[in-house]
Image (cartoon, rainbow, N blue to C red):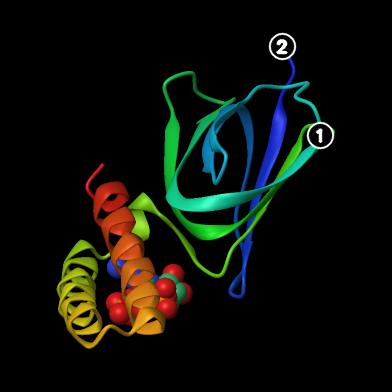
Amino acid sequence: MGQMTVQIVTPHGMIYQHHAQFVMARTTEGELGILPGHTNLLAVLAVDELKVRRVDDEDHVDWVAVNGGVIEVADDTITIIADSAERARDIDVSRAERAKKRAEVALEQALSEHSIDQEQRARIALQRAINRINVGSK
Ligand code: ATP
């Protein structure tokens, strides 16, 4: 069976690099399941979880909160470039809960002030916080 290399790059450097047999990501176009031999592609990622089934252990799955960015598949190498991404075990869920509350307050304020820019920022911050809570709770 073939295998792939998954690498995740953020401004903090290469935060993840492993061999995988299966990867599931969500792009702005929908869910993307990737097996070895997948067609090369470049897509925009949603703020969502990334699932990586590793090759070394059939039952070993890594979950990563990827907060937008791009995914490239090129000859069995999957590269994700994101402003931020955290592995489940590195997520501080209580910090994300606090960020969620702040984003909810900011969203309410933006809606009452009809500020579209502020509303968009608050919605993205809320999505990031919810993503971290979901992944960090796995
Ligand atoms: P906060 O308001 O809690 O800082 P944020 O959404 O503003 O959240 P970002 O600007 O997206 O945070 O990220 C800043 C840095 O902190 C990034 O390196 C990111 O990986 C890390 N980070 C953010 N939230 C968490 C968390 N809950 N657990 C672990 N690392 C986090």
Task: Count the marks.
Answer: 2
Q: Residue at 22% across / 48% down in the picture?
A: 137
Q: Which mark is residue 1?
A: 2
Q: Residue at 32% across / 76% down in the picture?
A: 119
For disc 2, the neighbor class at 10 Å (few under 14, some 14 to 19, many from 20) is: few
Looking at the image, residue 113 lies above or below residue 29: below
- Give amino acid for label 1: Asn
Q: Quadrant of residue 36?
A: top right
Tell me if residue 18 can be seen.
yes
Q: Point out the image quarter for the C terminus.
A: top left
Q: Quadrant of ligand 1?
A: bottom left
**Mark 1, residue position:** 40
- Give amino acid for label 2: Met
Tell me if residue 91 can be seen.
no
Report whether 123 appears left or right of 102: right
Viewer-closest of 89 and 33: 33
Distance from label 2 to label 1 (Cα)?
Answer: 19 Å
Q: Residue at 22% across / 78% down in the picture?
A: 111
